[in-house]
Image (spheres, grey):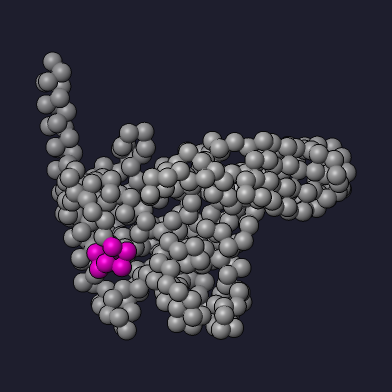
Amino acid sequence: MATAVRALIHVPRQVRRGDVVEIRATIAHVMETGHRPDSEGSRVPRDIVTRFECQLDGTPVFAADVYPAVAANPYFAFALRAERSGTLVLTWEGDRGFRHRETTALEVT
Amino acid sequence: MTRRAGAAGAAALLAGVLAACSLAGSAPALGPATGVGADTRRSGFDDMSAALQALQRDDTQNPGMLWVHEGQALWARRAGNGRSCAGCHGADGDSVASAAARHPVFDAETRRPLTLAGRIDRCRQRHLGLPEEGADGAEVLALSAWLAHRARGLPIEAPDDARLAPWRERGETLWRRRMGQLDLACHLCHDERAGERLGGAVIPQGHPTGYPTYRLEWQSLGSLQRRIRGCIVGVRAEPFAADADESLALEVWMRRRAAGMTIEGVAVRP
């Protein structure tokens, strides 16, 4: 499906100090469960995202372990109290050495 | 007791059907050009849960946007021969911004209707030297998604092309033809029983306003042809081949039926 890893990240703009903001992230991933047979009847090997993390300037602010029951193109939304501006680094790790990193700015006024 | 209630119910239903028939008989042809009576057509969007509607509305949540972004990147990508979509159609594709609202059109060269996906696929083969992919090929799907997104908010146009008329008629005939082991026609569900339930799901009127569409059931984006295949398999008939005349005719008819409705580009459906 994918020619390159694609992700959708949403970070609110014009955030005031102390606001609780919602960060949303979707990544294109097949999330193949490892339980399905292919057309030949053999099992399709598991290929899922296993871990999602978000750090603000190196400090972990959110992390999730992901399991095969999660649907394709997993979507995460989480809340964050914005105390200061910084760089949000979102990373996804998974089977077959899957690793993707997105960087976005959180600007607090 | 229950039998009697059943019979009364059936009579009421029959009366309803008769009333609907006489209404349909006196009403002019479908479409926005009628100008008579309220437009009772509904997009499948209107019957979705509030949560799903929110998912479609928000471009940072709508998973179809993953394909839109990919399509936008592909638009600018140079193929092996050094050419790109952007090279002919412009970097932002303004000249083809309404393409998703206009197709299928009649193609004088092949003497058949040409769908948007078909045109993208042909353009890629001819001008970029890329292999044929079909409507659900990864790159054709992504480019279709991007063009559908460009056309978001535009009304579906039904080309007033006399050469399309026989295809429309054939499509409408197919729409009304019973098929498969369940012996069902499209119109039995999507005209007569639209708004009622099939299991837990509301039966939509089946207007192709949001294709390619991200279906939660597919966990992926897919074409209108793929959706139609799903329905045809559902009534236990053998699906038409992707490039069969029947597929094209049905798509031409369905777009005519939805003329004037708004392109959602790209929709989310359950």
At 61% from the left edge and 68% from the top edge, which residue is drawn?
B73
Q: Residue B7 colored magenta?
A: no
Residue B58 lies left or right of residue B174; in this view the side is right
The percent position of residue B97, horizontal first and vertical second, equals: 52, 71
Q: What residue is shown at x 62% (from left), y 49% (from top)?
A: A96
Q: Quadrant of residue A43?
A: top left
Identify which residue is drawn at 30% across, 80% down: B110
Residue A98 shows in this picture: yes
- Compared across the picture, whether A101 is left or right of B27 comes to right
Q: Nearest the camera: B103 or B184? A: B184
Could you tell me residue A85's position as x and y percent? 87, 47
Residue A49 picture quarter = top right
Specify the quadrant that holds the N terminus of chain B. Answer: top left
Q: Relative to B130, say whether B268 is above or below.
A: above
Q: Is residue B37 left or right of residue A35?
A: left
Which quarter of the rendering shows the C terminus of chain B? top left
| Residue B269 in view, yes or no | no
| Residue B138 spot, x, y in % from top left | 49, 62
**Is B146 or B152 nearer to us in this picture?**
B146
Residue extending farthest top = B1
Q: Is residue A22 above or below residue B175?
A: above
A63 or B31, which lies in front?
A: A63
> Is residue B180 placed above or below A35 in the rendered structure?
below
Residue A108, above or below A69:
below
Q: Quadrant of residue B181?
A: top left
Locate residue B92, reporting x and y percent: 60, 74
Question: Magenta residues?
Answer: B241-247
Determine whether, in the image, residue B121 is placed left or right of residue B107.
right
Residue displayed at 74% across by 48% down = A90
- Queried whether the magenta region covers residue B242, the answer comes back as yes
